[in-house]
């Protein structure tokens, strides 16, 4: 069950390991792209600790510059929503009201691997 939505905001300020991963991920995104190693690490966290995965996804958005593409930042959210969408979509939608860039990022999440009910909610809260 997801935490209170405010628990996901600025989580990087309270977790050095999370901040370190976010800094590495954002550097990779800015200098040539996030590779399979980063994707597999996020997928593992989605399966084992989905709250941590959402904290990571939100932290990446909060820490990123406009130079990091929205579609790149959508990846961690897409991984979480494909695996745990029914459980986490409401908190992601609530976060989209608090994190300025998130509605734009949600517009890049699509595909048959996302449950239909989750896709419909994404469409309501995204800027497409």
Image (tube, rainbow, N blue to C red):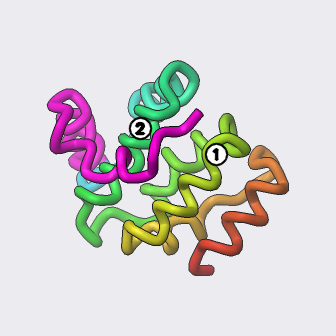
Q: Position of residue 33 (x, y in %)?
A: 36, 49
Q: Residue at x 50, y 74 (%)?
A: 104
Question: Which residue is under mark 1?
Answer: 81
Q: Residue at x 15, y 31 (%)?
A: 16
Considering every residue shown, the one lying at the far top of the view is 48
Between 48 and 87, which is closer to the camera in this rendering?
Answer: 87
Question: How many residues crowd around disc 2 within 10 Å: few (fewer than 14), some, or many (20 or more)?
Answer: few
Q: Which tag, 1 or 2, sits closer to the chain's start? A: 2
Looking at the picture, does residue 86 appear above or below residue 1?
below
Q: Residue 34, which numbered label?
A: none
Magenta part of the protein: which range? Answer: 1-28
Q: Secondary structure at mark 2?
A: loop
**Taking 11 as reference, is 68 above or below it?**
below
Secondary structure state at the residue bearing disc 1? helix
Residue 95 pos. (x, y %): 46, 61
Q: Which residue is drawn at the image coordinates 46% and 71% (left, top)?
A: 97
Q: Main secondary structure of the magenta part?
A: helix
Magenta-span inclusion, residue 108: no
The residue wearing badge 2 is 35
């Amino acid at each position: 069950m997801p935490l209170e939505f405010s628990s996901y905001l600025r989580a990087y300020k309270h977790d050095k390991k999370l901040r370190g991963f976010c800094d590495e991920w954002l550097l990779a995104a800015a200098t040539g792209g996030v590779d399979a190693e980063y994707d597999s690490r996020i997928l593992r966290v989605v399966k084992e600790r989905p709250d941590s995965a959402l904290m990571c996804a939100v932290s990446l958005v909060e820490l990123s510059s406009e130079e990091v593409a929205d579609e790149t930042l959508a990846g961690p959210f897409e991984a979480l929503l494909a695996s745990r969408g029914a459980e986490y979509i409401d908190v992601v939608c609530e976060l989209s009201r608090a994190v300025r860039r998130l509605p734009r990022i949600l517009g890049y999440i699509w595909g048959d691997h996302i449950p239909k009910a989750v896709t419909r909610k994404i469409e309501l809260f995204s800027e497409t």
